[in-house]
Image: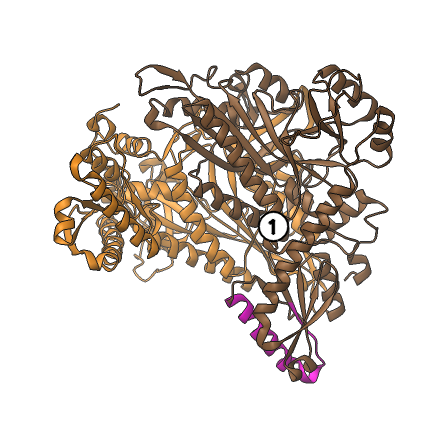
Chain colours: A orange, B brown
Amino acid sequence: MLSSKEAGVTVKKSENFSDWYIQVVMKAGLADYAPVKGFIVLRPYGYAIWESIRDILDKRFKETGHQNGFLPVLIPESLLSREADHFAGFTPEVFWVTKAGNNDIGERLALRPTSETLAYSIFSKWIASYRDLPLKINFWNTALRAEIKATRPFVRTSEFLWQEGHTVHATEEEAEQEVMQILGIYRELIEDILAVPSVRGYKSDKEKFVGAKYTTTLEGMMADGKALQMGTSHHLAQNFSKPFDIKYLGKDTAEHFAWQTSWGVSWRLIGALIMVHGDDKGLILPPKVAPVQVVIVPIHKDKDAEMVKQKAKEISDELKAAGIRAHLDDRDEYTSGWKFNEWELKGVPLRINLGPRDIEKGQVEFVRRDNREKMLSERGKLVETANLLLSSVQQALFERAKALLLSLITIPKDYTEFKTTINEKGGFVPAGWCGNQDCEEKIKEETGADIRVIPFEQDKMPQTCILCNGEAKKLAYFGRAY
Amino acid sequence: MLSSKEAGVTVKKSENFSDWYIQVVMKAGLADYAPVKGFIVLRPYGYAIWESIRDILDKRFKETGHQNGFLPVLIPESLLSREADHFAGFTPEVFWVTKAGNNDIGERLALRPTSETLAYSIFSKWIASYRDLPLKINFWNTALRAEIKATRPFVRTSEFLWQEGHTVHATEEEAEQEVMQILGIYRELIEDILAVPSVRGYKSDKEKFVGAKYTTTLEGMMADGKALQMGTSHHLAQNFSKPFDIKYLGKDTAEHFAWQTSWGVSWRLIGALIMVHGDDKGLILPPKVAPVQVVIVPIHKDKDAEMVKQKAKEISDELKAAGIRAHLDDRDEYTSGWKFNEWELKGVPLRINLGPRDIEKGQVEFVRRDNREKMLSERGKLVETANLLLSSVQQALFERAKALLLSLITIPKDYTEFKTTINEKGGFVPAGWCGNQDCEEKIKEETGADIRVIPFEQDKMPQTCILCNGEAKKLAYFGRAY
């Protein structure tokens, strides 16, 4: 058995962010490396967080008229290559199946890097008339992209859990509304549930989804000053409906090509959670997504063990009955100190330490994970206090993350300061941009920063491009990113 | 737009079972063919049935202490081959990835045909002491096996949705209990929810899971006299823990190899549902698994359209509030006749036809899908009647399926009758078996029937082997199968 110290995180978040991150992922029991480089396995605790995210999102998708479906993982090369830009974008990272058993297969098969091509070749069979529209289908699956860059659990892996939504509409406006409705659902999930603030807007043409007319994004800022793309929603216009022949007979009895969208978020959101909220003790989970919201640790000597455990169980049952995800840790093989460390490492938002004295006094001691403050509650107000504290932790995490984001937005007075900021501090650097891809590329080359997002809010647009001093067309947020 | 007749099933179940099955799958909107041969796509209605099955099973798994996890789809060849029998069993049907982008990868990677090898190479890192046991993890994913035999949606496809459970225990007895507990959970799902009766018992050594000590199975009987393996639960003993080095330090401070189980059910269960319950009009779904339990079709002339729709919506809302999955079909583009056919095709257990006269009289007309009987209920007893009828349909489907199963069990007086039965009638043919694999293989060769299941109930064991007339060791159920 490891000592509590070995089992805990041994590096500080502020000193070696990268090692700290890996230790949190591994030691909190979220994930482990798979035998193939760049792939990970999710342990039950990590998967439970994904289940929370999935269930919340799935409910919202269904409430807004989306349904789920299933697509195979294998896509024939001829289909993947039908939209040229799309193929060119994905082909360097496609895994190819070339054999089945001992036989060469004919045409090679791609492991799904994303399903536009497969989905749309099939949608075209399902859509005949306006009566069949809109078609709004979501797929919970994995995507596979052979990563050449350094991989990192959740943030960049060669296979990742995600959802991909694909919709077909009669008009361009409807497709636009869909793009924005989904972005709104993602915002709710990311900000209100995961407590991670974001900057929302458009991707530049260079950074948009290959094959899209435009891409909208939610961009987050991690504690080390690097940005993370947390979700994207694409307007595909008729870029796919034409090569994939998705046509419908309108009420006007004429044939029209349909308008489409696609959108997705992945387990990257778990990476965001860790990087934004975690501290030197480990993970800190926002209550709304935590698989365990309150852990109860009975503290006792042998003589009153049964009595304390019994009372602890009553507390656990009462919390569960009130809809709170409570867990009673009554393991005998571990000390209370070990348990405290373990649950802090796992980021459980609230802990109840229950000893004989608390029972005697009719009180309950809560410990908050986010600021480690203790609070005594009357036993009779157990559920009420737990709910108050959970919502207070949720709020505090968002505010702390918001303050972090704001502290990492630096408006540069010129390109020299732009470069210094990117190199020394990181974060988002909002600047004027002439809209020219040459400037975008040169900045990337010289600083490693690209345009993360062109925010919807453009009211503070500088007059000139940060690089060429030509007239600014857009306010863009530059930054280095995962 | 298709005519109602074209949209419906055009062959009889009794005349061409195979075509009938494909038409039901396609026309009820459950699935469609994918571009790669042997692969299918699930449409939302088909996926919704899978979601029902998944949610019910997932709840039971969690109640019994199982947790979910995630494993990648790619398994290195060296890992897949570590247990020799297992590898020999799966290798003819493995899809191999040999390239990533434009590069050859080193060792080739198998697309998961099943995850024992991958899971156990990782479990061995997670298990150190008795404190880490039992470990009970389930994975909801797909498995890929390149099918050489004729494929059929849900029943035999080269990729299929399933769950695979993998557990590790300190003792052989605990592993045995797990095998049987899971078989019990499968029985509940298959009989009590899907209304499909089964014969439960062991597989013969020839038919067991490659690498298992023994396999338990639930064997179903389809309406055409062919058996379908609906779920299996395997005792792996130490067959994998030894090559994969899954050891734990016991309370006795000695090291022990662990004991293991694995088990799974797939979307094949949807195939069973269709084949057992469906009729010439299409699908018939057992209420407990039906995505829509009651469909309400308003019937009206133009003048009272709004009033009838309003009342229909009240009925739909009232049913939903009572926890019944109701759907109001208020589409204007289709006639009532078209809607009746469509919902019959889709197998919705109950339909409410609501017209102005019903509203006037304060009554509701229900139509049962299983026997097409109509029943009038007082409007005030809407929910009560719906619940009664739903449970009555559920029961009736099971009884009908049970009668079907019993009618397809034929005890032969000798091997001649055995062969005639297999050839002319099909079904299960219970017979004495000497336990010799030669007899098992010869029967398979001569009749196409194999041992589907050696039932747990052995009290009616014949005295002699049906083939060699040697002493019978087992009562075995023979049959041809999907």
In the displayed structure, would residue A140 be above or below residue B479? below
In the displayed structure, would residue B30 be above or below residue B425? below
Q: Quadrant of the C terminus of chain A?
A: top left
Q: Is residue B320 magenta?
A: yes
Please state if B462 lies on the left or on the right of A229 as rendered. Answer: right
Q: How many marks?
A: 1
Q: Quadrant of the N terminus of chain A?
A: top left
Residue B289 position within the rendered picture, expressed as x and y whole percent measured from the top left: 60, 52
What's the chain of the residue with tag 1? B
Residue at 84% from the left image edge and 24% from the top image edge: B415
Q: Of the residues shown, which amino acid type is indicated by label 1?
A: Ile
Q: Is residue B200 magenta?
A: no
Residue B148, by quadrant, is: top right
Magenta residues span: B296-321
Residue at 12% from the left image edge and 47% from the top image edge: A357
Residue B440, by quadrant, is: top right
Please indicate, yes or no, whether residue A216 appears anywhere in the rendered image: no
Examine the residues drawn in magenta and state their main secondary structure.
Answer: helix
In the displayed structure, would residue B406 be above or below residue B309? above
> Depth check: B469 or B166 in front?
B469
Residue A379 position within the rendered picture, expressed as x and y whole percent measured from the top left: 19, 56
Residue at 64% from the left image edge and 32% from the top image edge: B457
> Depth check: A97 or A370 in front?
A370
Q: Which residue is mark 1?
A: B49
